[in-house]
Amino acid sequence: KAGVTQTPRYLIKTRGQQVTLSCSPISGHRSVSWYQQTPGQGLQFLFEYFSETQRNKGNFPGRFSGRQFSNSRSEMNVSTLELGDSALYLCATALQMNTGELFFGEGSRLTVL
Amino acid sequence: GENVEQHPSTLSVQEGDSAVIKCTYSDSASNYFPWYKQELGKRPQLIIDIRSNVGEKKDQRIAVTLNKTAKHFSLHITETQPEDSAVYFCAAKSGGSNYKLTFGKGTLLTVNP
């Protein structure tokens, strides 16, 4: 079956702009989590969605937001982009909330100029 | 919240040697400890995990040990091969309502032929 799909894979934005990233989970997976990956900082948790509701949130400013649709697809949005937002944004899905293995997408690499 | 420290940040070994990566966590309520491997330019993938009711788990050349009292867990790779070269991330999942997965900052393992 198809894996986790993230779009777009690469994008370049300028400071002050906003960006929307999309994640389509593996069929049947209802939990979608988002992580920011930067060199030296590892994987930092942004938020987790399940049944269209945000269930948990990391320590990121309010410029970072997300949502989940009835088909479990998720989007995350970053407004008023800053240079420090340049990172690989990874989506990870699971069958249920608070379960074991996460399945990651290949990520969306955002560059902010 | 949970804090996961991972050491070393880089590790270089000769093919056939063993490699050990160590992690400590802060939340005594954490109950699930996975390890992910991320090859260059690819998505993180689960390689092994352990739950808090188990002290050790082994899968072929890979083993994980958990010391709940000391709040640390380790990944052991024996008979390393060049294809083991990757970044390895440990993680800890808190119990209760704050169940998010917190990752360490990663260890870059290089296996020299």
Image: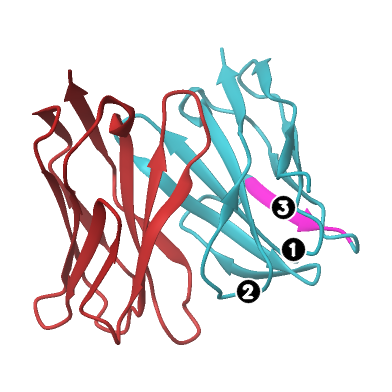
Chain colours: A cyan, B red
Give the distance between the C-alpha atoms of the residues marked 2 and 1, in whole angstroms: 9 Å
Residue A76 lies left or right of residue A43; in this view the side is right
According to the image, label 1 marks what residue? A29
Instruction: Identify the residue at image location x=29%, y=51%.
Output: B104
Instruction: Identify the residue at image location x=57%, y=69%.
Output: A56
Q: Tell me which label, 2 or 1, sits earlier in the chain.
A: 1
Which residue is at the front of the view, B84 or B43? Answer: B84
Figure check: B98 above or below A2: below
Q: Which residues are magenta?
A: A64-69
According to the image, label 3 marks what residue? A66
Image coordinates of residue A86 in percent, x first then y, are 51, 25
Give the distance between the C-alpha atoms of the residues marked 3 and 2, in whole angstroms: 17 Å
Chain under callout 3: A
Residue B82, by quadrant, is top left
Quadrant for the C terminus of chain B in the image: top left
Residue B50 lies left or right of residue A75; in this view the side is left
Magenta includes B34? no
According to the image, label 2 marks what residue? A97
